[in-house]
Amino acid sequence: MPPGPIRCHDVAMAPAAARSMLAAGSVVPLLGIGIGLGTVGGSPADSAAHAACLVAVAIGWLLHHRDRSSPVAPALAWSSAAVSLVALNDTLAASWYTDGPLPLASLSRHVWAGLWPVNLAGLFALLLVFPDGRRRGRYWSALPFAYALAVASMALAQWDAQQAGGEVVGESSPLRSAAGLVGIVLVAACLVSAVISLVLAYREGGERRRLQVRWLMLAGATSVLLLICGWVAEALGASIDAAYTPFILSIVVLVPAAVGIAMIRHDLFDVDRILGTGGSWLLTLAVSAGVFGVVVTTISRTFGAHAGLSQASAAFVTAIVLLPLHHLLVTLVGRVVDRDRHVAIAQIEQFAADVRSGVRQPESIEEVLREAQGDPDLALVLRRPDGQWVRLSGEAVGAPDGIRVEVAGDLIAVVELGWDSARARRRIADLTRAAWVTIEVSRLRSVLRDALDEVSASQTRLAEAAATERHRLERDLHDGAQQRIVATGMRLRILQRHVGGHAASELETAVDELEQTVRELRDLAHGVRPIRLSDGLHAALEAVRDASPVPVSLSVREPATLDETRRVTAYLVISEAVTNALKHAAATRIEVSVDDLEGRVLVMVSDDGVGGVLAPGPTALRDRVLSVGGQLTVRSPAQGGTTVTALL
Amino acid sequence: MTDALRIVVAEDSLLFREGLVRLLGELGHDVVAAVADTPLLREAVEEHRPDVAVVDIRMPPDHDSDGARVAAYIRSDHPSVGVLLLSQHIELRHCLELIGQPGFGYLLKDRVLHLADFDESLRRVAADGVALDPQIVQALVRARPTPGLGLTPREQEVLALVAQGHSNAAISTALHLSDRTIEAHMRSIFTRLGLTDDGSTHRRVRAVIAYLETGGQPSGGDPSAR
């Protein structure tokens, strides 16, 4: 049994006392059955009624077995046993007036009519002690004595009175009338106090006690409903037995069953939902009937006695109001009897609305679920389309075990509960139903984030590979082709010294050609990767500056940790931006700056040209910068001037 | 041609090395050793004590600026051996401190095709002079003014040619000026740089060094410190 709330104000009872009371409560219905079956005055129907009372007694024993000091067990047993006792007394008393009086009949006939408050004594005790024992305090401990006094007063008031055909026949006197009045008032006061005690227990109790009380509320409400049905049935002409049998059965079977469930497995079913649904349907029924009646009456009064018209209209109106009315009532009743769930779902819905309006991130869903569920250890594990399980932080985990969240048959997430119970499972199922959109969004965002990370990483790898390749190509050109050509030139030069005349001048031309080719190759290699980059960004940029026909001012502060890829990128971005400024902007001066921003490179190229370059700037530049995970901004107002800024 | 120089060639490409050896032979020089990597170059220099070592800047084992590092070693440990670095392209990282110092030259490889210039450069380096490729000087100083020195454009032009290692006569030819004008410019340069005549050729070298130090250094910092 899960641990209950600490009993701070509840009075338990001695196990021995509880056991004795249970035993006594067991004997009464058994006696009733025996007398009903074995005597002339009794009947099998009476025996069946006594047997039904055994249900509560049996559940009482079960509860006692679970918790030996719980006063609920004997109180529950006596809620039926007391009824059984009064019925037994009726049988005994009635037999006095027959030919074969039963034993004790002479005694019981005196209290025949006056014993009726005993019927309610068990229920009174049950209300007083359910679910965790009697409340502390003088007032509450005095109540049982007050009830005993009420029973005694009623017995005195109707001493020796007889019951005949439902009427009480007996002498009357001022003393008896006074005793009767005292008895009635005391019974009413005690019952009201007992109900108040239960309400207080509900209001002061934790979640568990509230759930337990709700079970009793459910059974009580059903009994009241059945009682009302009984009245209606009786008014419609049903026999008293047929009309009230469901009510009696609910009292002797349903209430004990509900108490048993509440005490042993309070989270067996979702009593909140049953109460909420049942209550709201009941109210819907009543209000619909009211609407129907009002419409029928109004129309038939206004238009005369057109029964067909009025009924059709009433049906129409009722049909229209039925569904909206029901929704309204579900919400209203839900708020009252199933407050926690409604508050929790409202929290989730508020969160979803916040996410829609951009106030909160969908990734906060785990915190919101924890709060709504009241479970700080709750964990949300998302299932990615590739079947991998991840937390919201992106951390990969093994296949989790918990409440599945599915969308259109697809498993998208699992909620691991810190505090697991049938009730917690139902609650989280409700919450995830309300939250599935945000869960799905955070799942897809996690997938998207990873994909973007992957794209960015692969871009960077490509950029690195390209930088390495440029370096290799440049070396190949210098050390391969260029070297070979110069070597050939040397051979020609040697040859030239040994020939004369026309051949010598031909060779001169050939060597000149070769030299030209070497220069071209050098320029080509420079375009692939400026060799002066090896001497640092500044050295390479000086070459850019010197090649420019307009003044270029240089300010270079190169980070010490600059890698080859970013160095090449920075160089290429600057030389492209300078080229653009010269080609398209008709600039008259260009400023180039390279700055160290805590290990990152801030590159800035600004000109005084025509401006008006459209955002987001030249594609080639953007691609270069993005390939190393950098950011590019191009500011180019129409009135002139362009500034290209790249953060690498 | 004057007397033959004793030369060690260090070049990893067989084709280029053989070409160079034959070319130097053709120029009347005596190639005492031709090696393909830096350890062998050190050995050859120690063994032969040549007049000049012609060294490729990129060589095994690292294929980085190993040639420049060995050049620095040769210049400090064997001052009698001149070093002429050859490179496919301008690469200054490891030889900035050598540039402008006597007995050191740095040429682009295709410069060897101009046999007369090449021969002259070799001889200058062997005679504790300077031989710098015009492109390298350009890369160092560019055509910008060097405000730190306070030279006139013409003086800078002259000094740039001096930095390349040219004699006054060669400069006067190149600039179509008389020898006397060049001498006047040189005196003005020495005065502006505060170099007194101590009777040695070192004044000329110091002028070049001062020029290269100011002109060769980027405004953002000292490249040799990288």
Image: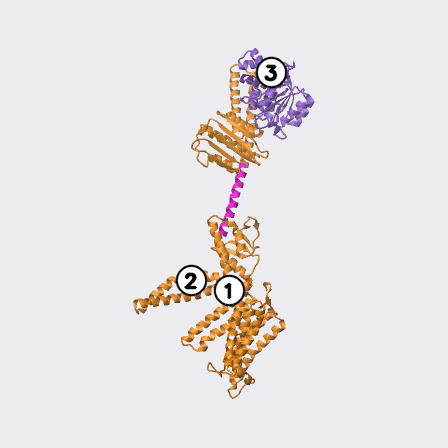
For label 3, the residue is B191
The residue nearer to you, when weighing B72 against A609, is: A609
Q: Quadrant of the N terminus of chain A?
A: bottom right
Extreme residue in the right direction: B47
Q: Give the range drawn in magenta.
A: A438-463
Disc 2 crowd, CA 10 A, few/some/many (<14, 14-19, 20+): many
Task: Report the chain holding disc 2.
Answer: A
Q: In this view, does A238 lie above or below A566?
A: below
Task: Report the chain holding disc 1.
Answer: A
Overall secondary structure of the magenta section? helix
User: Which quadrant would residue B197 be assigned to in this image?
Assistant: top right
- Residue B147 at x, y = what percent? 56, 21
Q: Is residue A359 above or below residue A185?
A: above
In terms of sequence position, does the residue under pointer 2 or pointer 1 come before the other? Answer: 1
Check the rendered structure and report the hue given to chain B.
Answer: purple
Task: Report the chain holding disc 3.
Answer: B
The residue nearer to you, when weighing A2 against A467, is: A2
- Residue B201 at x, y = what percent? 64, 15
Check the rendered structure and report the hue given to chain A.
Answer: orange
Q: Do the residues labelled 2 and 1 touch (CB within 8 Å)?
A: no
Q: How is the image coloured?
A: by chain
Q: Say which element carries label 2.
A: helix
Looking at numbered disc 3 in the image, what kind of residue is underneath it?
Thr
For label 1, the residue is A271
